[in-house]
Amino acid sequence: MAVQKKRIFKVFVGILIGILASHLSNTRFCKNGEKRKDSRPLQLLGVENMRAFNKNLLFVGVMTAAKYLDTRAKSVYDTWASEVSGKVMFFSSEGSYSDHVPLVALPFVDDSYPPQRKSFMMLKYIHDHYADQYEWFLRADDDVYMRTDKLEELLRSVDSRKPWFIGQTGRGNNEEFGQLSLDSDENFCMGGPGIILSRETLKRVAPHLEFCLQELYTTHEDVELGRCVRKYAGISCTWSYEMQVIFYHNQSGESAFSSDLKQKEVHRAITLHPVKKDRHMYRLHKYIKGLNIQRLQQSSLILHRDMAASMSELGYHVDSLSNVELAPNLSLFPAKKGTPGYLGDTNILGVPTKLNRYTPHTLENVLEWEMVSKTLYSHRDLNPRKRIGSSLKEGLSDVTREVMELINSYSKQRGRVIEFKEILYGYWRVNPIYGVDLILDMLLVYRKYRGHKMTVQVRRHAYVQQTFTGIFVREVSNTHHPSQHQLSDAKHLPLHKKIVHEILSKLNAKLPLLGKSGAVNKTNINFILPLSGRYDVFKRFLAHYEQMCILQGENTSLYVILYKDEKSPQDFTNSLKLVDDLKSRYQLESVKVVTPNDTFSRGRALQIGVDLLQNEDLMLFIDVDMIFDRSSLERIRRNTVIKSKIYFPIVYSLYNPRFLNGHGNLSRISQDVIDETRGFWRQFGFGIVSLYKSDYVDLGGFNLGIKGWGYEDVTFCDNVVKSNMKIVRAVDPGLIHVYHDVMCDEHLEIEQKTMCLGTMANTMGALRTLQKVFLEYKNLFR
Ligand SMILES: *[C@@H]1O[C@H](CO)[C@@H](O)[C@H](O)[C@H]1NC(C)=O
Ligand SMILES: *[C@@H]1O[C@H](CO)[C@@H](O)[C@H](O)[C@H]1NC(C)=O
Ligand SMILES: *[C@@H]1O[C@H](CO)[C@@H](O)[C@H](O)[C@H]1NC(C)=O
Ligand SMILES: *[C@@H]1O[C@H](CO)[C@@H](O)[C@H](O)[C@H]1NC(C)=O
Ligand SMILES: *[C@@H]1O[C@H](CO)[C@@H](O)[C@H](O)[C@H]1NC(C)=O
Ligand SMILES: *[C@@H]1O[C@H](CO)[C@@H](O)[C@H](O)[C@H]1NC(C)=O
């Protein structure tokens, strides 16, 4: 993975991740099964055929049993066994039969455990039939996974003419120790993760297998094989610490390799054991294939960079490489964009790794860093400090694993290992064109085990770049799942829409809730609206209510709790008149006004509304500044469940429209209202809530001691958190809080005044908008 190394620790890594988002215009097409035949230079050298040519490297004998032939054995045959440079055979008891795998039913062998006879007879059979055709022989169980490419690399690096007995060395566990009849310098190769014999070893041992089988000291098949090999081939199992890493055995039994596979043990191993379920075998195989793809993408990236660098020496700019001809009629990139042989955008992939590979030319294009330590510090959110999300966490652990592998790739030669402790802090940013940049301050432990031994903690910086590799789309025929007419509906759509269509139709099948509305009765939503003064805003609210609820025949009721505001008594009478007007126009029963003779308190107003309702009624506490659409009514109905769920939507709050050149002037909601410049999500607002009256009562209702606009909603929310009720807290794009001016009374206490000014500042405009205003009118701020 190393692209450029600066001294030992300053690694500059390019790591790959593919993204499957946006840029569908760049879509490339990889039709499955379409093989290219134009790698002429390689063919000339004969390299391409090397693997096929050398098909007699390894013979694999898989020990299985009749009852596993259709499951474990089949999964082995379907996955790694198909990629062995050599031959794979399965060995089972006398009379076994399989349609799925090449099988030898060993005569006079049954499926009893321990399988000593099966193992020894298998080796004998292999020797008698195949000893001269293969260099290496692997005794495998049916619950082992082999990374065949790595195995091949390992075997090709060892002289197969010598006697070898390779595997994970065992000496018995604590209970067994002393009972295996092993001397202190004797060992055996553990059977589970696989045992490899060179041809010479097999030849030396085979004539004596029958005899060894009659002279068993223990019931352990692998211990006895080890004893036989030691006695007749004169060798032990490889004494090497590395073998524990290469032949990896996981202790957690049945559940091994059934959950997270992103572990350094899995990445480093050649054989993985035990994989007890066939579906876990397929899953593991797919995961390993993914790793291989990633590795190939990495080499492709490095080749692109090399190409760009060499061409730049010849005077070509990286942007122009796609048109370069090396000689007349011989272009550097033989296939054009959009054709199958296309090699990728060198002007993106060929850019060398450095922190300034991208240069912003305007303020908007400057990429911002986020800081990572125990928590994430981000400018993107109202709440600047928050938990590190699971995707970033996973990304960071991927990166550190890769970096550590890189740092440790020469550990053996240098006689030291370096272990990862933690990331003290780091910065990261995403460039939508090139990829992710990371700067990590890592705490490591440096252990020198050769020469002058020592263990010290060290801190090192790592500069990491992950490069995006473009988008690949693969068409999969899915003949059995979606019904035919759904497929034919999608036939004429462009590809990316087809995919979306297919996903949606599957989702729809799984989520009956997304079906056509209107089929079920819609619960009545009782709006409770406290109001004091503010006639103009109320007029807007009521007009909106009329449009969204009354004219659409929505099942809703509205309770207005109207107070007299001493400062504007006119508002009170006007508001009353407005409601009467509406009621008479539509002959409505479902809109009611209550006028308490009291000073205004939001909590008490809501309580008055609640008192008018029945226990099983669904209530929505709302403010006069809000507007809503019908989709949010639907969400209210779905997210509020009696005795179970209370919905606290996060509403979208518009900024002061004076800063928005009229964009903030809202007459109706549409999806494109919501963006970063026009408003923000009110993460800390808990005033809009929907719940059933009985739940409200059970939770003790509001604390009514608070006057004016108080914290009754926050304290109520706290009570809900403490209760057994579930809170549904999510952004609701249909609920919008319209901006209104905040007036801060000059006579307020200094603390309250600061708070008030703070609120005013927060709702004024987006940071970028204010920045622009500031830059434009700098003089005024002097
Ligand atoms: C291996 O075993 C350990 C402990 O039993 C477990 O935590 C880990 O997830 C296992 N690894 C795999 C790849 O299953
Ligand atoms: C290049 O290819 C074109 C058309 O394929 C052909 O007419 C031309 O002669 C070729 N030039 C050389 C130098 O081979
Ligand atoms: C819907 O309401 C009508 C009358 O209001 C009633 O007759 C019908 O049974 C209800 N349907 C369901 C599914 O609740
Ligand atoms: C309206 O809501 C009430 C109470 O939730 C329910 O009983 C009634 O069936 C609903 N009416 C319609 C037409 O959906
Ligand atoms: C409202 O309250 C005031 C004093 O608290 C009282 O004088 C007045 O008569 C009350 N009005 C009504 C309509 O109850
Ligand atoms: C909003 O638009 C309406 C009509 O389109 C207009 O009368 C009103 O003045 C506008 N308000 C602002 C603040 O621009």
Image (cartoon, rainbow, N blue to C red):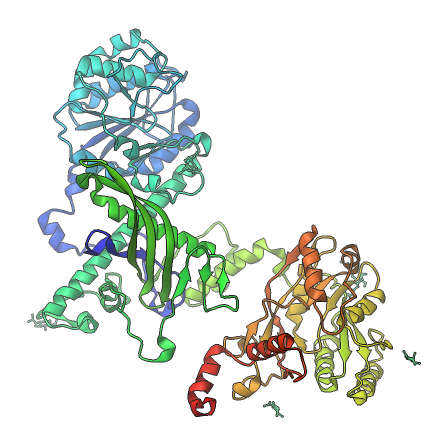
Where residue 618 appears, as percent x and y from the top left, is 76, 63
In-image side of 663 versus 240 (left or right)? right
Q: Nearer the viewer, residue 51 or 313?
A: 313
Q: Residue furthest left?
A: 327
Residue lying at 43% horizontally and 92% vertically, measured from the top left: 779
Q: Give the quadrant of residue 174.
A: top left
Q: Nearer the viewer, residue 526 or 772?
A: 772
In-image side of 316 versus 180 (left or right)? left
Q: Residue furthest front?
A: 750
The answer to whether residue 18 is above or below residue 660 is above
Q: Nearer the viewer, residue 596 or 157?
A: 596
Q: Give the quadrant of residue 224.
A: top left
In-image side of 390 versus 263 (left or right)? right
Residue lying at 79% horizontally and 76% vertically, measured from the top left: 600
Quarter occupied by the C terminus: bottom left
Residue lying at 16% horizontally and 37% vertically, measured from the top left: 54
Where residue 349 appears, as percent x and y from the top left, is 25, 64
Q: Quadrant of ligand 3?
A: bottom right
Where residue 390 appears, as percent x and y from the top left, is 46, 54
Q: Give the quadrant of residue 27.
A: bottom left
Residue lying at 33% horizontally and 13% vertically, measured from the top left: 180
The answer to whether residue 110 is above or below residue 137 is above
In-image side of 126 versus 116 (left or right)? left
**Can residue 518 be seen in the rendering of this structure?**
no
